[in-house]
Amino acid sequence: MQRRTLLQWLAASATISACQQSPRVYEMQVSRDVGCPCCHVWAEMMEKTGRFKVSLIDVPDLPAYKQQLGVPAGLGACHTGLVDGFVIEGHVPAEDILKLLEQ
């Protein structure tokens, strides 16, 4: 094999491999009311997408925590997600969160 052919093959392989990179997996921290039955289900749905690694944290005073994050009073839900500097409140679909993160 000639050197030029080998270099062209290597360049093409690198281009193909760059196009086949796995999508980014985001770290998401989900703070929830102690004992809430739905938060873990939503967190599992996020993880099943393959795009989020979720850690659940029970917060004894969730309203105070939400206030600290700047969530307006009356707009809070049973859990609050933090991902890449964004606050995600409630049962937001994964597709919408990914759209926010990737724009």
Image (cartoon, rainbow, N blue to C red):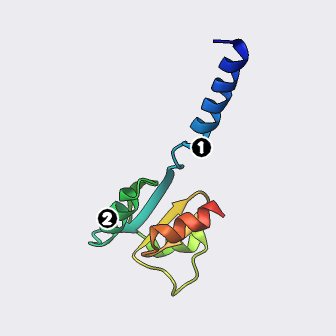
Pinpoint residue 91: horizontal percent, then vertical percent. Answer: 42, 75
| Mark 1 crowdedness (10 Å alpha carbons): few <14, some 14-19, many ≥20 | few
**The N terminus: image quadrant:** top right
Residue placed most toward the observer, 6 or 34 = 6
Dot label at residue 19: 1
Residue placed most toward the observer, 2 or 33 = 2
Residue drawn at (60%, 30%) of the image? 13
**Residue 73, above or below 46:** below
Pinpoint residue 55: horizontal percent, then vertical percent. Answer: 40, 54
Dot label at residue 52: none
Find residue 37 and report its image quarter.
Answer: bottom left
Q: Secondary structure at mark 2?
A: helix
**Residue 84, above or below 87:** above
| Mark 2 crowdedness (10 Å alpha carbons): few <14, some 14-19, many ≥20 | some
Residue indicated by mark 2? 40
Q: Secondary structure at mark 1?
A: helix
Q: Quick check: 87 left or right of 62?
A: right
Three-letter code for the amino acid on which mark 1 is drawn: Cys
Residues at marks 1 and 2 touching, judged by CB atoms closer than 8 Å? no
Image depth: mark 1 or mark 2 in front: 1
Task: Answer whether residue 65 is visible to the viewer in this image.
Answer: no
Earlier-in-chain disc, 1 versus 2: 1
Residue drawn at (59%, 57%) of the image? 84
Pinpoint residue 51: horizontal percent, then vertical percent. Answer: 46, 54
